[in-house]
Amino acid sequence: MPTPTAEAPATAKATTAIALDSVSKIYGSFAALRNVSTTFASGSCTMILGENGAGKSTLLRAAAGLITPTRGKVSIFSQPPSQQRHRVAYMSHAPMLYDELTAMENLTYFAALHRGDACACVGSPEMALRAVGLDPHLTRPVGQYSQGMRQRTSLARVLQTDPEILLLDEPFSNLDVSSAVHMVELLADFLTWPLPGGGSRTILLTTHLASLAEPITTHTLHMRAGQIIQPPTEAAR
């Protein structure tokens, strides 16, 4: 994973990072997604808004390749998500950490899993923890961390894979305002990290706290009942 830098990445021609083509996801008689078609440009940070049950999380999970659409097609850089896993990282609203392990032990464990999956993009767990402002040598188990520290550890867990696309489901969940603002600052920094061969990082996030994500948001998308009611539009600056 690259050393974080305060400098913006070189300008590159925008390409389509994520595309959904007539995607539906049906669970029994419930349609979590209904004929969704949209694209997300490389280098963008799109905030997905909508009430609970709008389909936001399902869209993210489909983009991450964690679920297979009932109908339609999802593409990551024009290829199936299964062929682009090394370029995508997904962080759910749950930290998905082992409470009895330290932050360093958690990240080292997950790094080993990625290496076992033939992923060549795993960076240094220590560097990832420092990037989110945590001491990699902290000896307390994660179960004793504050919610903000747990969220930062979870973010470090996905950042250590050096993703080109970062998918975040309610990253500000259960955070106080100060911790949420810090999370936004970390994401803003991530967007500036250089990529080998050029290009730009991309973020897709869901939230009920739109005002928190506005500083990094380039586009907003509104969903309701499994459908897009307002396609990605440029955020006001």
Image: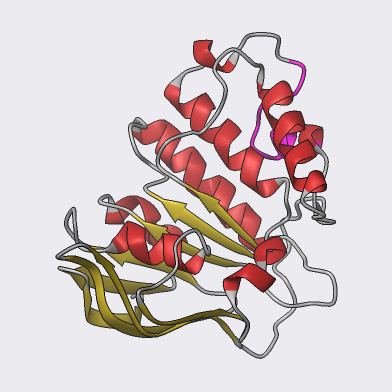
Q: Residue at x 70, y 86 (%)?
A: 12
Frontmost residue, 189 versus 164? 164
| Residue 119 in view here | yes
In which quadrant is the C terminus drawn?
bottom left
Frontmost residue, 206 versus 35? 35
Q: Quadrant of residue 111?
A: top right
Frontmost residue, 44 versus 113? 113
Q: Residue at x 70, y 36 (%)?
A: 110
Q: Is residue 186 above or below residue 195?
A: above
Q: Is residue 19 above or below residue 141?
A: below
Q: Is residue 94 left or right of residue 53?
A: right
Residue 172 screen position, x and y as percent: 38, 42
Q: Is residue 129 above or below residue 226?
A: above
Q: Which residues are magenta?
A: 127-137
- Does residue 186 show up magenta in the picture? no
Residue 70 screen position, x and y as percent: 35, 74
Colour style of the rendered protein structure? secondary structure
Q: Is residue 12 above or below residue 176?
A: below
Spot the residue most to the front.
Answer: 28
Q: Quadrant of residue 57?
A: bottom left
What is the tally of numbered marks visible in this picture?
A: 0
Q: Residue at x 53, y 64 (%)?
A: 65
Residue 234 screen position, x and y as percent: 37, 81
| Residue 135 in view here | no
Residue 63 screen position, x and y as percent: 48, 68
Q: Is residue 32 left or right of residue 82?
A: left
Frontmost residue, 34 versus 50? 34
